[in-house]
Image: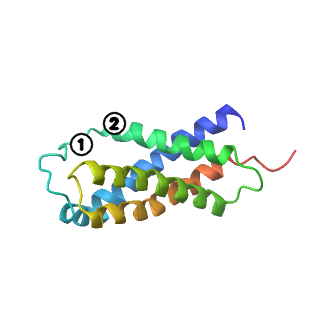
């Protein structure tokens, strides 16, 4: 895997994860997240720090790209989706249940649903990142 392709996949993947994450969590499921907040108050930052969210998306994309670049075998778009979905699910399952155990930021319903939605979020990112990471065909 060359560094240029990995870098491009990470940057483009981060942009896709950022946009898909905004649409999924701040638009489509915004009311679900609001209705399933925990008892903690004043924890949502308004306005959100978009630079911080972008850096998080960059790290997320880099992890997916790293996993995809270091796997063996044929890398199809389906495999990219699968890897992105698994990475997303495992990251957010870890974060959500750890936060549920030590804070009052969300209730149990939100804690369970959030990593399931990350399967979609990470899977979409994984498709694009996989397409950019996989070796080009030909000589």
Distance Cα–Cα, label 2 vs label 1 = 9 Å
Quadrant of residue 8 in the image? Answer: top right
Near mark 2 (Cα within 10 A), the count class, few <14, some 14-19 or many ≥20, is few
Residue that appears at 46% across and 39% down: 58
| Residue on which the image places disc 1 | 48
Q: Secondary structure at mark 1?
A: loop
**Image quadrant containing the C terminus:** top right
Residue that appears at 61% across and 42% down: 66
Which is nearer the eye, 28 or 37? 37
Label 2 with label 1: CB-CB less than 8 Å: yes
Residue that appears at 62% across and 56% down: 80
| Residue on which the image places disc 2 | 52
Which is nearer the eye, 59 or 134? 59
| Direction right: furthest residue | 139
**Image quadrant containing the N terminus:** top right
Is 131 left, or right, of 23 in this rendering? Answer: right
Which is nearer the eye, 98 or 82? 98
Question: Residue 7 in the image: x percent, y percent?
Answer: 59, 35
| Direction front: furthest residue | 101
Question: Residue 15 in the image: x percent, y percent?
Answer: 46, 45
């Amino acid at each position: 895997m060359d560094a240029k392709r990995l870098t491009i996949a990470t940057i483009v993947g981060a942009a896709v994860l950022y946009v898909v994450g905004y649409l999924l969590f701040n638009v489509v499921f915004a009311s679900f997240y609001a209705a399933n907040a925990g008892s903690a108050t004043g924890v949502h930052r308004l306005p959100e720090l978009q630079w911080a969210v972008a850096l998080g998306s960059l790290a997320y994309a880099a992890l997916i790209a790293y996993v995809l670049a270091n796997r063996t075998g044929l890398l199809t778009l389906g495999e990219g989706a699968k890897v992105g979905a698994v990475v997303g699910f495992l990251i957010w399952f870890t974060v959500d249940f750890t936060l549920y155990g030590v804070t009052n930021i969300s209730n149990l319903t939100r804690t369970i649903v959030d990593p399931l939605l990350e399967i979609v979020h990470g899977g979409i990112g994984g498709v694009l990142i996989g397409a950019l990471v996989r070796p080009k065909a030909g000589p």
